[in-house]
Amino acid sequence: IMYECASAVTHMHEQERPIIHRDIKPANILMTLISGTPTVKLTDLGVSKMVDPEEMMKTAMFSTVVGTPGYMAPEQYEKKEYGMSVDIFALGLVFLAMVMYKGGPDAHLLPLVGGGFMICPVGQDMMMKAAMKQPQEPVTKIEATDTAQVKKVKELILQMVRYNPKDRLGIRPAMDKLGQMLGKGAAPAPAARELTRLPTPPGSDESSSDDD
């Protein structure tokens, strides 16, 4: 499941006009059967954003705050400009939720930090620590009782869920690491291709600068 999720995000990010999902969370990851094989589908592109080719010549960044608070990156909480790494942060939190999930009637897939009245989403906690100049804490710890596979997954999560976007592992390396855990080789990069631009409806205005 983790590999197919990472593959879906890689596919979006490596398009000729890259797509940022901006709302990756368990509720948007569905399972279906294709020829009897369980297959992951990353759904709900309602708040996704396609990066224009002109923006790719610069650092494509956005500022509109969208997404689900429990899976938002700290830069979104800080209302700073952000890029495709917010998807990597959110996907890392999905993986964290999967590792933390224990089952039972009160189980959930929402990774939170703190305790008592101070429980809050990971991204918000990182934002508050940065504002108070406190050191960032790892979102998970590798335990002696963890299996070798769980240790590798936790190491990957620690590389994806980081405060500084520049410190986060890229989505393709993340996918390749998951592939190695499954005995797969590195996936080939997509071939370059041009996308057909749909005709503009009469009376529409393409000059809007809104980034959502």
Image (cartoon, rainbow, N blue to C red):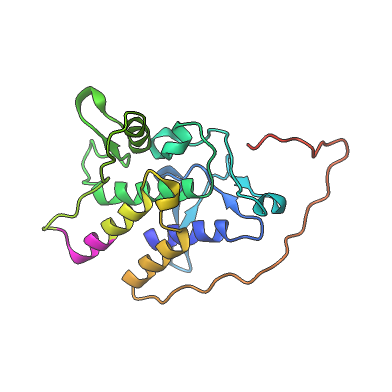
Tell me the quarter of the image containing the N terminus: bottom left
Q: Is residue 171 above or below residue 75?
A: below
Q: In screen coordinates, is 158 left or right of 63?
A: left
Tell me where the magenta segment starts and ends, as one range.
Answer: 146-152
**Taking the image as drawn, is residue 132 in sight?**
yes
Q: Which residue is drawn at the image coordinates 61% and 48% (left, top)? A: 60
Q: Position of residue 203 (x, y in %)?
A: 87, 35
**Taking the image as drawn, is residue 1 in sight?**
no
Q: Quadrant of residue 44?
A: top right
Tell me the quarter of the image containing the C terminus: top right
Q: Is residue 212 magenta?
A: no
Q: Is residue 17 above or below residue 127?
A: below
Q: In screen coordinates, is 97 left or right of 166?
A: left
Q: Is residue 36 above or below residue 136?
A: below
Q: Position of residue 143 (x, y in %)?
A: 14, 54
Q: Which residue is drawn at the image coordinates 11% and 58% (left, top)? A: 144
Q: Which SS type dominates the magenta stretch?
A: helix
Between residue 40 and residue 144, name the one nearer to us: 144
Q: Which residue is drawn at the image coordinates 26% and 51% (left, top)? A: 99
